[in-house]
Amino acid sequence: MHFGYKTMNIALLVSYDGTELCGWQVQKKGRTVQGEIEGAIARAFSLSVRVTGSGRTDAGVHAAGQVCNFPFEESIKISPEKIADALNVCLPQDVRVLKSAAVPDSFDACRSAKKKTYRYGVYLSRREHPLLGRYAARYGFAPDIVRMRGCAALLEGEHDFSAFSTTGSSVKTSVRTVYSVAVDVQTRFGVPCVSFDVCGSGFLYNMVRIMAGAVLGVGDGSLPLSRVERALETGNRDLLGKTMPANGLTLLSVDYGFAPFGESGQ
């Protein structure tokens, strides 16, 4: 960014396949989503800026509707809506800007977020499937959908979710509000698949992946529902099952209480 230039606030709606990426946040080694976007901005517009994301996703996690924002020099003659096209020319195939728009100066992709919705997907098979394994984890058991939905309902509302976070994560509070949890079953390529959609005010580190593991465990009978209840009451991570793999997790959308990209956008 050149000193003294007037800027406007630009928001991007970004989708990425996280398989070969080391997560959102820039790091010294490895490709990251933030690094790729900042590099594209530098190549397309000769600007050195820091991009603010709605949150950090881990290595291997995907996004259908990640949101980020950055300051853009008004002296550069391009409409905000066309910035997406200019950046996509400079981005790798696994990262794409779906929409770009000018937003109020007060908009911050992280602090302005009201709700986030994630999906965890699994496919039910004894063997790996090449058309499913990139965006869903393989699960070798056939869970009971009724029991899964019973566990999902238990996780809705405001709770201390410390048991649903990786040990050692540092946050001011582990209390979060989960607005909805939906479990759905469909068939893809002849294989039964389970999707676990959770919408909340915010999430702890690995929270959705641990929740998905608990719901699946209750569904296949390996985890009693009473242990999930005690985990919520006590914060004891050991009461729950494993953290599910990163490849099954996708950030679907971020809700700001208004549509940054117009009525048809997020």
Image (cartoon, rainbow, N blue to C red):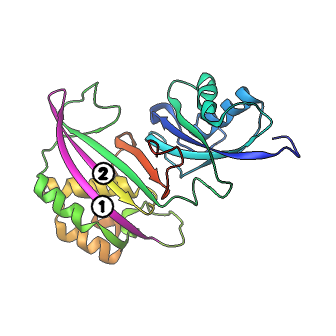
Q: Would you say 122 lies left or right of 87 here?
A: left
| Figure quadrant of residue 29 | top right
Report the amino acid beneath label 1. Answer: Ser
Residue for point 17% across, 39% down: 186
Q: Is residue 188 above or below residue 154?
A: above
Residue 242 visible at all: no
Q: Main secondary structure of the magenta part?
A: strand
Which range is magenta? 174-196
Residue 254 visible at all: yes
Q: Is residue 12 above or below residue 93?
A: below
Determine crowd level at label 2: few under 14, some 14-19, many 20+ residues with C-alpha closer than 10 A: many
Q: Look at the image and tell me in which quarter the N terminus lies.
A: top right
| Figure quadrant of residue 137 | top left
Frontmost residue, 23 versus 146: 146
Residue for point 11% across, 57% down: 146
Residue for point 45% across, 39% down: 60
The image shows residue 103 at horizontal and vertical percentages of 62, 49
Separation (CA) of disc 2 from disc 1: 8 Å
The answer to whether mark 2 and mark 1 are in CB contact below 8 A is yes
Of marks 2 and 1, which one's residue comes earlier in the chain? 1
Query: SS of the residue at dot 1?
Result: strand
- Is residue 213 highlighted in magenta? no
Frontmost residue, 36 versus 232: 36
For mark 1, what is the residue?
180
Query: SS of the residue at dot 2?
Result: strand
The image shows residue 248 at horizontal and vertical percentages of 34, 41
For mark 2, what is the residue?
197
Report the amino acid beneath label 2. Answer: Asp
